[in-house]
Image (cartoon, rainbow, N blue to C red):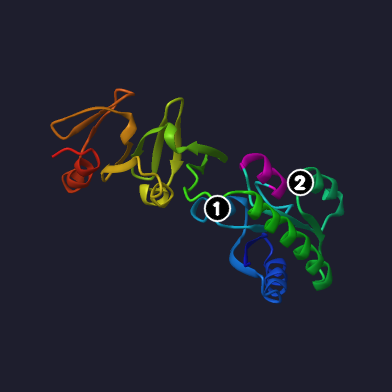
Amino acid sequence: MKIKCLVVDDEKLAQEVLVHHISKFSNLQLEGICNNVIELIQFLNKHTDIDLIFLDIKMPEISGTDFISIYNNPPAIIYTTAYDQYALDAFTQNAIDYLLKPISLDRFAKSVQKASKFILRDKIATPVVNSATESFYVKSDKRLVKINGPEMILIEGMRNYFCIHTETDTIMVHGTLSTIEENLQHLPYICRVHKSFFINLNQISYVEQHVVLLKNRKSVPIGLSYREQVYQKLNIM
């Protein structure tokens, strides 16, 4: 069984050491390298099959231990750090192991063996779920905000930012609609109806003259180039 893993560290040398060690094990498959927790969450939003993360603890903005508190059901984690005072935090958060830098190949091997047993046991005990996760994270005003797909009503694109309207809140995110589009592709009820709008099809009250009225009373035009696909999804002939 191949274990798909990620390296998350803000230091280039630390990344290189882990990549080297991973290359020595035929059962490990490196899927990517992230420089911080925000990149990690963005990666996990797009790749739901990661088994193991080698996660540095002390990083700017969001620490490795903070990641556990903001991300539900993360993959298995082996913490890496140059500071031994974080060991207690690592184990209280149910990390598989804790590697103190500089990481020797022998110590790395013991950690991988422990992770392999844990991941194999977990895969046997847990049925495979084919449906992708319905939640993802966005960065809004230096905060990571969890977005639950079914709760989205509308995503509205502006020039340099977009707004996600949910049942309880409006979240403003810097970027274009293309930056979030990949996170929406696995949600069948989210549909692009205009160059500036995505909507939740389950939140439609009615459609009239190429305009959608949503349950939050927002009216959204259906763009000419999107009408055919929108009407097909709505079974409108």
Q: For the stretch drawn in magenta, what is the main secondary structure?
A: helix
Residue 157 in view, yes or no: no
Label 1 belongs to which residue?
A: 44
User: Is residue 50 shown above or below 225?
Assistant: below
Q: Tell me how many marks there are.
A: 2
If the image is split into quadrants, where does the N terminus sit?
bottom right
Q: Report the amino acid beneath label 1.
A: Leu
Label 2 belongs to which residue?
A: 94
Marks 1 & 2, CB-CB < 8 Å contact = no
In the rendered view, does 108 fall on the left or right side of 209? right
In the rendered view, does 169 fall on the left or right side of 232? right
Which tag is nearer the camera, tag 1 or tag 2? 2
Percent of width and height locating residue 31: 57, 65
Label at residue 15: none
Query: Measuring 86% from the left and 49% from the top, which residue is drawn there?
Result: 85
- Quarter of the view holding residue 208: top left
Query: Measuring 72% from the left and 66% from the top, which residue is drawn there?
Result: 14
Crowd tier of the residue under label 1, counting other residues whose Cα lies within 10 Å: few below 14, some 14–19, many 20 or above: some
Q: CA distance from mark 1 to mark 2?
A: 19 Å
If the image is split into quadrants, where does the C terminus sit?
top left
Percent of width and height locating residue 66: 69, 43
Q: Report the amino acid beneath label 2.
A: Asn
In the rendered view, does 71 fall on the left or right side of 121? left
Q: Is residue 205 magenta?
A: no
Q: Nearest the camera: 211 or 62?
A: 211
Percent of width and height locating residue 86: 82, 49
The magenta span reads 63-72
Query: Measuring 43% from the left and 26% from the top, which residue is drawn there?
Result: 167
Crowd tier of the residue under label 2, counting other residues whose Cα lies within 10 Å: few below 14, some 14–19, many 20 or above: few
